[in-house]
Image (cartoon, grey):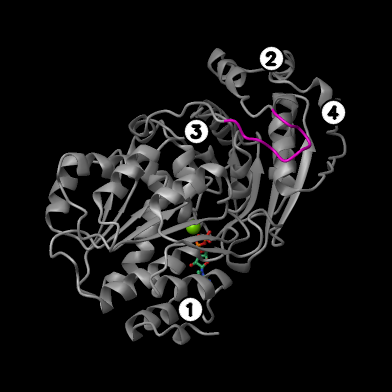
Amino acid sequence: MQFSDFGLESRLIDTVEHLGFTAPTEIQQQAIPAAMQGHDLIASSKTGSGKTLAFILPALQRLMKNRALSKRDPRVVILTPTRELAKQVFSQLRLFTSNTQFKAVLILGGENFNDQVKVLEKDPHFIVATPGRLADHLTQGHFYLNGLELLILDEADRMLDLGFAKQLSQINEAADHRKRQTLLFSATLDHAQVNDFAQELLKKPKRIAIGGAFTEHNDIHKRFYLADNLDHKEALLQHFLKAESYQQVIIFTATRSDTERLANLLIEQELSAVALSGELIQSQRNQIMEGFSKGHHKILVTTDLASRGLDLVNVSLIINFDMPKHAEEFIHRIGRTGRAGSKGDAIAFVGPKDWLSFKNVEGLLEQTISFAQVKGLTGKFKGLKPKKVSAKAAKVKDIKTDKSPTTKVKKAAKKTFHVAKDVGDMPIIKRKKALTAQQIEDNDLDEVK
Ligand code: ADP
Ligand code: MG
């Protein structure tokens, strides 16, 4: 199958060819025609399989072919959970709109509100946004959605995890349901919350799932290592940064304070590392991501802020210094490598306080994971027995074994566990009350409980 088989406008095909894409990926083969027929979609496929184009192309086609419902209102709104991902989707969209009459704008939390008001006054056709800030502009009447034709939620499940349900409902309700089409995309779309939400937003949606949501990503080679405590993890990290060959690496930690501390530790050793966390002001966040994507730094130390969607072609190694709080984030974190058919490596350290998260990941991947060892760096910790696994036991163990450098880190460690349930069975991921959307956009994504 070829891109020209979809019946897309030739301008769109030209741009796709210009990008060097010869054949559509599986998700593109299925989602593009279904979206062009006007169906609402719940579409999932593994990380790095080209979901962005699968929604950008039918969106552009629709605008080029159909007359606008309104002269002023945006015709397409694309929402993503993080500012970094919104920027990336926006730049991909701009490749297609830059030589057309269609205006696309980016509306993000953390940036100047009044500048955005001016931008919205120019009646853009496309808005790419994070939901909290866009909802604020909607509340204040800076734009209307009566003419909206297409609402696209990229990484829809993550937006719900982060507590954006209210903002998404508000945006949904401001648009005309009869005329509007809605598309949901993610690599992980099977939790109950997504289903309930889909019922509210979508009309007779078509489900497209390429592979099971959690099927093995064969291009990503995963290894897990047991670690006794923080010192042990740091020793393992040093080892792998020397032993592995990589172009660029992303190291994921559980808390934002750890990103800074680890990056400094690596910088002291003259490694080219940089820390990204939501604590930073937006211009710093932009600078760091731009520098990293241009290859100015070899190592990015971050939190789940960067777990979703980012397409950084030179990242060939992922290190989970800590396991993620939400099991699905593991799939997304490691999916920052092995993109578009390339190969990648993913390493994870599993200490006592990671054990429950690890079991949840094991459940999610539907496989028993065995541990690899590094000669000279094997420790004492061999995992927790199921009957001992309770949030309380894990907490006690945590504090005893992990040498946390600051009280802040200790406090964060204490708060880590809220996933304790059904070890060994399919995981039930219990979520505590999320921060408000505005808090998230103003502060961080990684410490949401
Ligand atoms: P996903 O959203 O599924 O994680 P992306 O949309 O970010 O994946 O795409 C991953 C990478 O694959 C990007 O670099 C993108 O440019 C590239 N890509 C997209 N479609 C194709 C295609 N048909 N052929 C080759 N590469 C593609
Ligand atoms: Mg994506």
Q: Is 393 drawn above or below residue 428 in the view shown?
A: above
Range drawn in magenta: 421-430
First of labels 2, 4 by sequence position = 4
Amino acid of disc 4:
Gly
Find residue 436 and report its image quarter: top left
Q: Which residue is mark 4?
A: 379
Residue beneath label 2, please?
399
Question: How many angstroms separate mark 4 from mark 1 (CA)?
Answer: 48 Å
* CA distance separating discs 3 and 4: 29 Å
Mark sitting on residue 20: 1
Q: Kindly tell me whether mark 1's CB lies below 8 Å from ligand 1.
A: yes
Specify whether 373 is left or right of 49: right
Query: Mark 4 Cα within 10 Å, few/some/many (few <14, many 20+)?
Result: some
From the viewer's perspective, is 182 left or right of 362?
left
Crowding at mark 1 (Cα within 10 Å: few <14, some 14-19, many 20+) = few
Q: Residues within 10 Å of mark 2 (few under 14, many from 20)?
A: some
The percent position of residue 204, horizontal first and vertical second, equals: 45, 61
